[in-house]
Image (tube, grey):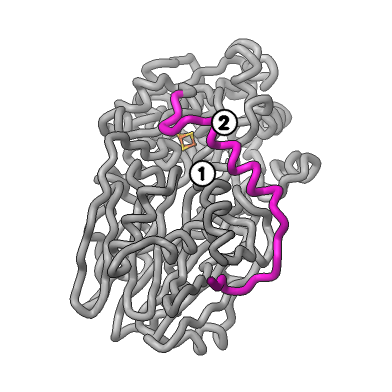
Amino acid sequence: MHEKCGIFGVYSHTMDIARLVFFGLFALQHRGQESSGIAVTDGNGIKIRANMGLVSQAFTESDLAQLKGYIGIGHNRYSTTGSSQPANMQPIIASSEGLTLALAHNGNILNVRELRDELQPHGYDFRASTDSEVIANLILASPGKDWGEKIRHAMHRLQGAYSLTIMTDNKLIAVRDPMGVRPLCLGSIDSGWVVASESCALDHIGARFSRDVEPGEVVVIDNNGVKNYRVKSSKKALCIFEYIYFARPDSIIQGRLLYEARQAMGEILAQEHPVDADLVMGVPDSATAASTGYSKASGIPYCEGLLKNRYVGRTFIEPDQRLRDLGVQLKFNPLSRVISGKRLVVVDDSIVRGTTTPHIVTLLRKAGAKEVHLRICAPPIRYPCFLGVDMASEWELIAARKTIPQIRDYLDADSLGYLSLDGLIRAIGLPKDMFCLACFTGDYPIPVQMGMDKLALETLPEKEPVGTQK
Ligand code: SF4
C-alpha cells in the first residue's frame, strides 16, 4: 500500500531555500520514492529541478546552487493517477495571461475528467497525465482579484483529496481540501515559514511546529505576513491510515503523536485478542510501536525477531509479483537464535492483498518459530481507496474475498486477530466523525462512482513535460 506524495514549502529571506527544501523532502521520503522535484523563485521567474528516483539521487550540489530564491516548494512522488515517468514529476509549473504558479500536490481528484474537458476548449494545454495539472490550470482559470480568491473558487469545483503547496512570484500558499483527507502542517523557521505534509520534516530542518493547516484552509504567506481563508465543509475525512501506517511515528497529526497512537493500538489489540505466547515482535518498522504496546498490555516480553535491511525500499516498491515475493526475502532476516522454539505474537499494521504476510510467516517458521499468532493494527480492509492511496482493486483485497478464518488458513498462522474499528478510534483518541474509514466500512466521503474519472484520466495520452499555457 502506498501513499501518494510528500509536499514541502519554505518562505525565508535569510536561509538557503533549496537546501531546506531538499532536507524537508529527505525527511518525507517515505511518502513517495518515484521522483522528486524542487522549484524556487527569487521573484523573477521560477527555476525547477526534478528527477526520477530518491531525493538523494535526484539532486546534485550544483542543482541546489542554481536554485536561488526566497520561496521554494518540493515534492516526492508516488503515482496513483498518471504513470511513473518524467512527464508526471512535480512541482508542476502552469501559466496563463501573465500569471504563473508552481504547484505540488498530495491526494487524488475524482472529478478530474469533467474539469479537464471544461478547461481544454479554452486553450489550457495538458502535458502530463496527472490530476495535479488539472488543479493548477483550474486555479489559473478561476475568477478572483487575487490568488486567495482564485484558489477558494477552484476549491468549490474540486472533488477529492488535495493538500497543496503553491508558489507564485511572491507568495507561498498552503491549501488543504475541505475534508482534510491528507495532512498538512505549518511551522516557523527564524523569520520565515515552512509548510510540510508531516511535522517530522519541520523537526529535521530545525523549524518549530505551529499547527495543522485546517481542513478547507488556505494559508497565504508573503512579505505582509500570513493570511488565512476558509472554505467550509460539513464532512471531514482525514485518512485513518496516516495514523496506522503512512505517516512517520515521530510526526504529530491533529495533536496526536503517531508513536503513542500506534502503541495504544497495540495495547487495545492485546485486550481484544489475547493469546498465550512467549514473545511479541513487530513487522519492522511500521508495527514496532504497536508491538511494544501489545507487549506492555499483555506482559509478554518484546523481542526483535525480524531484522530489516533498511536500504531496501518498502515491500511494494516494485509492482511485479515475482519481485514482490523476492522483496520480502531481501527485506527481512529472522533472528533464529531468538525465536527458535518460541510461540510468537507477530504484530503488523495491516493486511491488504495478503501477498507479503505468508512469506513472513514462512520465514519465521523456517527460523524455528513454534507458533505464529498474527495481530493486525487495523480492521479487515474490504473496500478499495479512491482518495489517493494505491491500495488494490476490490477483487485483490483478501478480506473482501475471504472470511477471517479463511485468511488465517491462507496465511498459515496459528491465530489471527484484527483490531476492531472502535478499538482503533479509541487508540487514536480523536472523534470518529473526523476520519475517512471507507476501506473498512465502504462508506465513502464522496460517491464512489466518481472514482471512475481517475481511471478515465489514466487512459489519456501523455505528452512532453513543459509548463502549461493558455
Ligand atoms: S479509503 Fe482508506 S486509505 Fe483511502 S483515504 Fe479512506 S481511510 Fe485512507
- The percent position of residue 17, horizontal first and vertical second, equals 39, 80
> Quick check: 359 above or below 103?
above
Left or right of residue 48: residue 71: left
The label on residue 111 is 1
Please name the residue shown 35% across and 20% down the image.
Answer: 422
Mark 2 and ligand 1: say if the CB distance to the nearest ligand atom is below 8 Å.
yes
Q: Which element carries disc 2, helix, strand or loop? A: loop
Instruction: Tell me the amino acid under the disc marked 1.
Output: Asn
- The percent position of residue 464, horizontal first and vertical second, equals 69, 70
Magenta part of the protein: which range?
A: 443-470
Where residue 193 sits, quadrant-wise, is bottom left
Please name the residue shown 56% across and 88% down the image.
Answer: 62
Q: CA distance from mark 1 to mark 2?
A: 18 Å
Left or right of residue 465: residue 146: left
Q: Is residue 428 visible?
A: yes
Please tell me how crowded label 2 is: few (under 14), some (14-19), or many (20+) other residues with Cα within 10 Å. many
- The percent position of residue 297, horizontal first and vertical second, equals 35, 25
Left or right of residue 153: residue 24: right
Residue 453 among magenta residues: yes
Magenta region's main secondary structure? loop
Please tell me how crowded label 1 is: few (under 14), some (14-19), or many (20+) other residues with Cα within 10 Å. some
Instruction: Tell me the amino acid under the disc marked 2.
Output: Pro
- Residue carrying label 2: 384
| Circle nearer the N terminus (1, 2) | 1
